[in-house]
Amino acid sequence: MNYGGPAGDDHSMPASETTHPPMAAAPADVPAPVDVPAPVDVPAPVDVPAPASRPRRRWPLWAALGAVLLTLSGGIPVVLLTGALSHVEVGEPATAASPTENPTTVAARQVAERITAQLDKQSAALLSGDRSGFLGIAAPAARGDLRQRFAALRALRVTRWEARPSSLPMTAGKAGEWRLAVEFQYCFVTPDCRPSPLIVETRWRDGAEPRMLAIGRSKPAPTVGDRANGQPGSLPWEVSALATKTGKRTIVAVPPAHRNRLPGLLKRAEAAAKVADEYVVGGTKPDRYRIFYAGTKEWKRWYGGDHPEWSAGYAVNVGGGHYELVLAPDSFDYGPGLDEVLRHELAHAATLPEKRDYSDESSWWLVEGLAELAAVDGQPIARYAGLSDTRRLVKGDWDGKLDTIAPDEDTTDKAVTGSYGIAYLAARYFLERFGEERLLAFAKVVLHDRRIPRQTAEEIFDEPWSDLHKECVAYIRAAVR
């Protein structure tokens, strides 16, 4: 099966997303980087025509893995503005600055103080449901964008919203106008969650009470503030109206045109969450699994819109230890296969670490193998829908190494399905031989602690990695005879 893994590995997905493999034909008895933030008045991205529909079964691990995003997957230094990137300390009057301090810096600090006061007002208004107060800090031209964001954030049950300058403001070219990168931190549903961070570019007109002239959308970036966890492209609530429904373990969101799918999607998401919770690595369950269904337009806009044609869904690292799952427009055509996509992607949210650099090609088999174990949810190997493609790859071009099976954008659908199948069988070998507890302990040291298998195998399994790898490959070959 291919679904699409986390967005964050470097395999066919942006740095913080995991993708799910293309949907393989099932047996008869089986149910079928960081850019400098652009000025906020840059025109919206042009939608790219959607690729022709095809059966899919891949789950991207876009850790936009990195992940967020979740992992959000990584850390290339990025300059968001030409000014300093340290967080601005506000509250001390500019007159307290050293007499030798640059007058331009003093003025910028004063502007930052006034803007921060406005951002505080806006945050309080959002959390209290006061739309007029939320819009009130902005000039009329910016209120349409803010009105949409207010509605989407309230629909997602925002419970924490903090905004602070990420750097000193810079003049915007017109007298009295300033550009400022603002870091937002937010939680949905759970008030005491670890907040997800986001930096966007804003533009202001100064005065006793500055007015926001424009607010940008988030841009893909490997760093956010002082953290190397990165951020994905435009988030759903930044660019789309949303209808939502909340359960005990999940929150699901869809474009309003697909509101009728909410009850069924929530029921299936809650069932998938119970399975994913069994695969938690590191001991802490996600506070809520966040699941977004994308229509055709949204699929091309959310999180950068750059997804493999074969992807049925992906998981994005959005920071703060949160991954957001996105379902492809045709995912509801999969019937029971949608449940596998959900289990696979939610397992990424349960197993992957916060940092985006959790994975490379050498550990791809473990990332996707764990997710595939969750996807099949205990069914026998003989009923694995990707078994025939796995057999073809194992008996064909595979070199017998686990660290070489990661597909890329040019890999054929059948070969991708086979790669996911090898990952599944490898993870199943360790599960059957050593049990769930030791398998998850192994995932912890390899994915979270970034230690290579040959350094940890004897510690976890009491056997050398060379012997275990040889036995695992023999198990895989026997399973596809």
Image (cartoon, grey):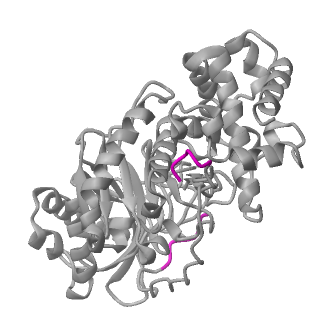
Q: Quadrant of residue 222?
A: bottom right
- Using the image as rendered, state which of residue 190 and residue 83 is in the foreground: 190
Instruction: Residue 408 in the image: state x and y as whole percent.
Output: 74, 58
255 to 474, vertically: above or below: below
Instruction: Residue 113 in the image: state x and y as whole percent.
Output: 27, 63
> How many discs appear?
0
Q: Is the C terminus in the top left, top right, bottom left or bottom right quadrant?
A: top right
Horizontal relation, residue 64 to residue 360: left or right: left
Q: Quadrant of residue 274?
A: top left
Residue 31 magenta: yes
Instruction: Name the residue located 51 percent from the left edge and 28 percent from the top edge.
Output: 281
Instruction: Residue 430 in the image: state x and y as whole percent.
Output: 67, 22
Instruction: Provide the major secondary structure of the magenta segment.
Output: loop
Is residue 68 visible in the rendered structure shown here? Answer: no
Direction top: furthest residue: 462
Instruction: Residue 47 in the image: state x and y as whole percent.
Output: 50, 83
- Using the image as rendered, state which of residue 380 and residue 373 is in the foreground: 380
- Using the image as rendered, state which of residue 30 and residue 119 is in the foreground: 30
Residue 446 magenta: no
Instruction: Name the residue located 45 percent from the left edge and 88 percent from the top edge.
Output: 43
Horizontal relation, residue 158 to residue 450: left or right: left
Q: Quadrant of residue 371?
A: top right
Instruction: Name the residue located 24 percent from the left edge and 39 percent from the top edge.
Output: 248
Is residue 105 visible in the rendered structure shown here? Answer: yes
Direction front: furthest residue: 28
Horizontal relation, residue 113 to residue 236: left or right: left
- Using the image as rendered, state which of residue 364 and residue 183 is in the foreground: 364
Instruction: Name the residue located 51 percent from the left edge and 58 percent from the top edge.
Output: 313
Q: Which residue range is magenta in the image?
A: 27-38
